[in-house]
Each structure stands twice: as structure tokens, then as C-alpha cells.
Image: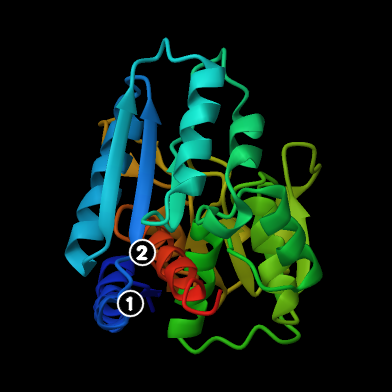
Amino acid sequence: MAAQLIDGNALSQLIRTQAGERVLQLQARGVKPGLAVVLVGDNPASQVYVRNKVKACEQVGIHSVMEKYDASLSQAELLARVEALNQDKHIHGILVQLPLPAHIDAQKVIEAIAPEKDVDGFHVASAGALMTGLPGYWPCTPHGCMKMLEHIGYNLRGKHAVVIGRSNIVGKPMAMMLLAQNATVTVCHSATTDLKHHTLQADVIVAAVGKRNILTADMVKPGAVVLDVGMNRDDDGKLCGDVDFEGVRQVASHITPVPGGVGPMTITMLLVNTLASAEQTLHA
């Protein structure tokens, strides 16, 4: 029996409807949530992501500011712009779209964002909060994955979760979030010698390395839940994930498609983080 699809588009719309209601509640108290998105250079994929983020803000009523700069923008100029946004009381979230041009130190730019406006969840303060179980903004993609597990009513307690990938953006925070829900977590990566050995023991698998078919049907235990974070192109140029979707869906109990799975949830959780930041200003 084929796996049930976890529809990221449908879940996103549900959460965005709730987000729209939160926007109205904030506006009633004199707060207009605001997100600033900064794009440097002409990366085509980044342009698409930024357009989608701005469109999502409009959908729920969040005020969005899109600042686009030429690739020649200096690091000092970008840092100055970030500091100005830090001081802007109408902006509750700041997102600097990655990747940045090679002459700009991305980590320095991320660290320049005020932690209370770090709605991407990449600041070291956000990472530390996640690591230690303190309140903070979770990175949007793994946060979206957790919402998907919650949506299907999956109880992680005592389950074995395998995360394929160890990036600061997905792999590491994903492992921390799963651990916080009492899963036993294994993190696999490019130096893992026998990936199949680990994935065959997993109740939940999160594939997040950006490599086609890193996970195939023979690597999945029957009934496992598979979340595909990858974004690749197949031989025909069509979007695909890290998972051999057609094969794995015959073995898994639940699976996310690409496109239409984790991707929409990433942007939705960005909106949720921005709203949380705006709501914090009511208690400041």
C-alpha cells in the first residue's frame, strides 16, 4: 500500500489562515507586523524565493519591505543596512537571503541581525536557544518538518529518527528539534560509511543533503515516515528531492512530495516567526 502524502501546500494554507487571524489581532492593538527581506545580487533561485516570501506576506497581511542591491554592494554597506533595520520599529523580522556574493562574510551579516528580529533562526543566539531548550526562533525548514509530523499526529517519543545532512540550516537544528521531542536521533553525513545500515533502523527519516536519490526504497524500513527536504532537478529538468519518491512511497507510511511538501512550509514558518516577533513587542 502506497504511503500517505503529507501535503505541504494544504497544511501551509491552514497555518496561513491562522496567521492572518493573528495579524488582525495585532493590528487591533496598534501593531502592523513587518518583515524586511534583503537580496544582494542576481541569483535566479534567490529571486524566486524572495518573490514567494513577499507574496506570502501579502497573503496574510504582513507588511513586507523588499530591498534589492547590486552584487557589488560592500560588506560594510550591507552591515549598515542591517543595523538600520535593527533600529526600525516597523520591522519585526529581518531576512538576508543566502547565498551572498563571495566578498561578503555571510556569518558576519547573520550575527549583525538583532536576535529578536532573527526570524530565519540562523543567529548564534537562536542556535544556542534551540540547543538548550530556551525560547527562540527555530530555523524555518526544520520547524516546518516538525509541524508536518505534528499534523499527522506522530508521537516521536522513543522513536528512532535519522537525519541525513548536518548543515546549520537544516540538519543540526532538525536533530535538536527531534531530540527535544524525545526521539533517539542519528545524524548521517558525507563521512558516514554505511548510510543504509542507519536508515533501515529509522522510524523517521529526514533527507536534507541536496543529492538526488540519496534514499532509495531498499534503505527504508516498512512503515517509516520520510520527509524530503532536498531540492534538485531530474534528467528532464523537473524539480525533485533527495528521495527516490516513486520507490520509497511503496514502503513508507507517510512521505512528503517535491514540490509541494516541505518547501511551502519553510515560507509559512517564516511568517509564523515574524508574527511571534511582532507579538513580543506587546510585552516589551
- Which mark, by number, is residue 15? 1
Q: Is residue 259 left or right of residue 198?
A: left
The residue where tag 2 is placed is 268
The spot of residue 165 in percent (x, y) is: 66, 47
Instruction: Name the residue: 61% across, 49% down.
Output: 122
The spot of residue 145 in percent (x, y) is: 50, 67
Where 161 sits versus 57, above or below?
Answer: below
Instruction: Name the residue: 28% across, 73% down.
Output: 16
Residue 217 seen in render: no
Q: Residues within 10 Å of mark 1 (few under 14, many from 20)?
A: some
Residue 246 seen in render: yes
Query: If the image is split into quadrants, where does the C terminus sit?
Result: bottom right
Kind of residue indicated by mark 2: Thr
Badge 2 or badge 1: first in the primary sequence: 1
Compare residues 196 and 175 and report the one nearer the observer. Answer: 175
- In terms of secondary structure, where does tag 1 sit? helix
Q: Is residue 122 left or right of residue 196?
A: left
CA–CA distance in space, label 2 to label 1:
7 Å
Q: Is residue 204 left or right of residue 56?
A: right
Q: Do the numbered discs 2 and 1 sit on residues whose CB atoms are within 8 Å?
A: yes
Where 177 sits versus 18, above or below?
Answer: above
